[in-house]
Image (cartoon, grey):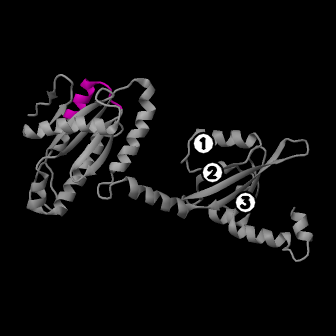
């Protein structure tokens, strides 16, 4: 095809097309084993490596360790089967900067039908990926506390349930808020209230890291999904520790002297108290209401027959 273009009157020459391509896309060619045979100038400019540093190496030189082994296993299976593979890949330049590329790998065949090389065409999509991540952050995360917002938590809950549905596993859902939070805003101003919300999320994230998912429903109301706790004894130990951490005195620039806060919490169990989030939230919210009526600074576990409450000191 290229020969026809080059030989046809009033058509651009192949060399001209190559110049234009070199300005628009990154191109590399490897042998059947993935060893780099050729790179164009834009590839070198973007990666920060000279041609002499790239030829003879593999693309692992650019690895950012963003993607897991499964990602590249699927890529290799596709191209080694003679099929075209396309995806977005995060790579790392010579100076350590990460950048995203839309990559298309095209197998090339010898006359015998075996794969002889791979041509890779790359387009820098770093800005597009960053804009997409920014939009995702704005859509699913709370701007002030940086934890999941209501929609983000709903999505995360759906993913968790899909993963555990066939394992008959229990998980616990808690709803909580800050006791007398309105008084903080009224006494010290909304800046102080915002600082307290940030402090609370920092403390809870630290104590539940790796074992729970935290979200903000709005105002001072939060939701917590314990994903790695499946028995009530372990849950109780975690909740006791959480309550103790939350009530530790703190000092903020918006508030004179040391202060402390407490929370009230209601807990429901999946799948015993519901299979869907709204039903679980309703049961947890009922427990939260009971705790509030009893004076706050406590938690309550929902049960069809009895309720149990943490006795704080």
In the image, the segment drawn in magenta is 228-240
| Number of marks present in the image shown | 3
Q: Residue 223 or 310: which is nearer the viewer?
A: 223
- Rate crowding at label 1 as few (under 14), some (14 to 19) or many (20 or more) other CA atoms within 10 Å: few
Residue hosting label 2: 87
Where residue 300 sits: x, y (%)?
Answer: 17, 32
Quadrant in the rendering for residue 232: top left
The local secondary structure at tag 1 comes to helix
Mark number displayed over residue 27? 3
The disc, 1 or 3, on the residue closer to the chain's N-terminal end is: 3
The local secondary structure at tag 2 comes to strand
The local secondary structure at tag 3 comes to strand
Confirm whether residue 297 shows in the render: no
Residue 144 higher or lower than 216, as above or below: below
Where residue 198 sits: x, y (%)?
Answer: 25, 54
Where residue 293 sits: x, y (%)?
Answer: 8, 39
Q: Quadrant of the N terminus?
A: bottom right
- Rate crowding at label 3 as few (under 14), some (14 to 19) or many (20 or more) other CA atoms within 10 Å: many
The disc, 2 or 3, on the residue closer to the chain's N-terminal end is: 3
Residue 312 higher or lower than 203, as above or below: above
């Amino acid at each position: 095809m290229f020969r026809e273009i080059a030989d046809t009157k009033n058509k651009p020459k192949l060399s001209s097309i190559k110049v234009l391509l070199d300005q628009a896309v990154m191109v590399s060619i490897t042998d059947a084993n993935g060893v780099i045979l050729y790179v164009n100038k834009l590839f070198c400019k973007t990666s920060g490596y000279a041609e002499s540093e790239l030829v003879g190496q593999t693309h692992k030189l650019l690895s950012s360790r963003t993607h897991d082994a499964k990602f590249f296993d699927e890529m290799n299976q596709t191209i080694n089967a003679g099929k075209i593979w396309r995806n977005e890949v995060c790579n790392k330049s010579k100076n350590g900067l990460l950048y995203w590329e839309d990559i298309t790998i095209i197998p090339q065949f010898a006359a015998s039908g075996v794969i002889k090389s791979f041509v890779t065409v790359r387009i820098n999509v770093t800005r597009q990926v960053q804009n997409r991540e920014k939009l995702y952050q704005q859509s699913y995360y709370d701007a002030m506390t940086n934890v999941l917002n209501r929609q983000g938590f709903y999505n995360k809950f759906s993913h968790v349930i899909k993963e555990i549905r066939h394992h008959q596993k229990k998980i616990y859902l808690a709803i909580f808020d800050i006791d007398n939070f309105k008084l903080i805003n009224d006494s010290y101003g909304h800046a102080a209230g915002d600082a307290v919300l940030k402090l609370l999320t920092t403390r809870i994230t630290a104590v539940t890291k790796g074992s729970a998912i935290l979200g903000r429903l709005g105002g001072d109301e939060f939701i917590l999904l314990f994903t790695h706790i499946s028995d009530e004894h372990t849950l109780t130990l975690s909740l006791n520790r959480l309550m103790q951490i939350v009530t530790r005195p703190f000092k903020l620039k918006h508030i004179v002297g040391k202060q402390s806060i407490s929370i009230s919490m209601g807990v429901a169990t999946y799948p015993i108290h519901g299979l869907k989030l709204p039903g679980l939230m309703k049961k947890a919210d009922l427990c939260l209401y009971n705790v509030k009526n009893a004076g706050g600074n406590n938690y309550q576990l929902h049960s069809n027959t009895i309720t149990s409450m943490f006795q704080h000191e």
